[in-house]
Amino acid sequence: MSHKESQNIEQATTTVTTSQPDDKTRRYDRQLRIWAASGQAALESSRVLVLSSSATSTSILKNLVLPGIGHFSILDATVTTPADAGNNFFLHARESIGKPRAQEAVPLLRELNESVQGEAVFKDVKELLGTEQGRDWLTGFSIVIAHNLDKPTLEELSTLLWSNPNGPPLVAVRSAGFLAEFHIQYHEHCVSQTHSDTAPSLRITRPFPALLEWARSLDLQDMDPTNHGHIPFVVILVKLVDEWRQSHDGNLPKTAAEKKEFKSKILALKIKPDEENFDEAEAQAWRVWSEPAVPSDVQALFALPPLPSTSNAHTPEKHATFHALLDTLAEFTKDPSGPGTLPLSATLPDMKSDTESYVRLQNLYRQWAEVEKNKFKELFKAKHPQLADSANPEEVDTFVKNSHHLRVLRGKQWGAFDKDREAVANSLMMAPRETATHLGLSALTNLLSSDASKVTEDALRSEVQSIVGEGVDLPEELDAAIGEIARAPTADLPNMAAFLGGLVAQEAIKMITEQYVPLNGYCVVDLVDSWTGVIG
């Protein structure tokens, strides 16, 4: 089945078919229900670079190979040591000792999924950073993941990838014993498919013509009792809002007394005490006075400033269509001939109703959502003709469908947080445990870049103090963090590698598929006390 022929989730779960699914669909069935065919296509076209073939690195790759990335490269000039053979499941134990670690790991990783291509590059990243050809190669991937890279090299790699807004994200991972953290470096990340649990507006106070006509046509007093008990709550609320406005100069309920009166009017319409649809309408009455025309999160995106200027900074080309669609969306909400809201969503929640009424309501929403989507496309073509001609129609449809839950994340370069002493000080007050662990790992990174033998509790505490500045009180939580770090500064433990591998791969998949919302900052992990947190 080609990508164009792939079914979306709605089709896959509602279409009855007698044909058997192909091998690919059977293999990826569960994840297709999570990120659909579009997400799977993005994964399969991705190229992932991992610096190091440590236990943690191979665990991350395991969780990317299984769902089906297109290709991975392991860049590692390390030879397998007895320690590696003891903690890395993707090596041939003692048989791998003395051999290139990456070359030993690649065949075992590829066994997990024969459709994934992989290669081992037996070179030092410093060598590649020193040549133009090497730098071009490093920036040619979908995402770059580095585990326990020394600070000078990580800084150089970070600067290289940050210099190009269209370059790949960088995931910097640091682990020591039972403590770890990772940070995703990106300029901007735009998400239309956030898969939010928040229901979109049902347009109850701004009903479209067909919905308002249905509500006004209902004669609740002379209706058949069975039908009366199956009117969808949406229609009930639209009817009562219409009647309320006629008797209140076009206004909605505002005061607590008015809201209470409105709810009492809903319950007064019941002709039998067990009519759950009216109880549901009363419970959903908050939508009448609490649903904004445009959600505040989306409204804020309309005023989003351009990216901060750097040597090459501009709106990334890969997000040009998204920003053009966002600009069109802002105009759509301001259009005098429009509803003054975001395009209607065809998604309806479950509700107390019979099948006939629910299907009728669903069809009304779908039909009008299609009308407003076409209006949006006309406006998009008028405002951005070149991008409208080149844009993927599926991308436009997805944007409109999910316009109630759009997100635009602005990231930071790796290491920028530690240089902002005010931000670090605030973080110490707001999240002392997470920040203390992060600072301990940052201090470890600094010390390892000079001399690993200097990693002691006193040295770590002194280095942390130099990061935050003199006069800043360090929290008690720092003692536990630096104690664990000093105990195992370079230990790559299998259980931490497994846990961290799942976390990092999950966030990498979000970045690659541009679905769900990735973290923004440092994700700190403590398996001593079993907690995670995000700071920075």
Image (cartoon, rainbow, N blue to C red):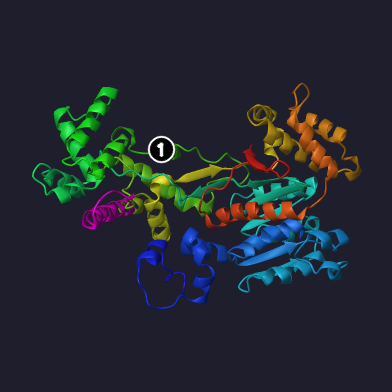
Question: Taking 386 as reference, is 468 above or below it?
Answer: above
x and y, in percent, of residue 285 in the image: 29, 36
Say which of 380 and 199 sits in front: 199
Q: Is residue 158 left or right of residue 22?
A: right
Give the secondary structure at mark 1.
helix
Residue extending furthest toward the right: 453
Q: Is residue 355 one of those drawn in magenta?
A: yes
Question: Taking 276 as reference, is 137 above or below it?
Answer: below
Q: What residue is drawn where x is 34% and y is 52%?
A: 347
Q: What residue is drawn where x is 32% and y is 44%?
A: 332
Q: Is residue 172 one of those drawn in magenta?
A: no
Q: Amino acid at mark 1?
A: Gln
- The magenta-colored residue range is 348-377
Q: What residue is drawn where x is 33% and y is 50%?
A: 350
Residue carrying label 1: 299
Residue extending furthest toward the bottom: 19
Residue extending furthest toward the left: 222
x and y, in percent, of residue 85 in the image: 83, 63
Callout 1 environment at 10 Å: few (<14), some (14 to 19), or many (20+)?
some
Q: Is residue 319 left or right of residue 502?
A: left
Question: Taking 249 as reference, is 15 above or below it?
Answer: below
x and y, in percent, of residue 22 in the image: 48, 76
Say which of 485 and 250 sits in front: 485
Instruction: Label the magenta part by its dominant secondary structure.
Output: helix
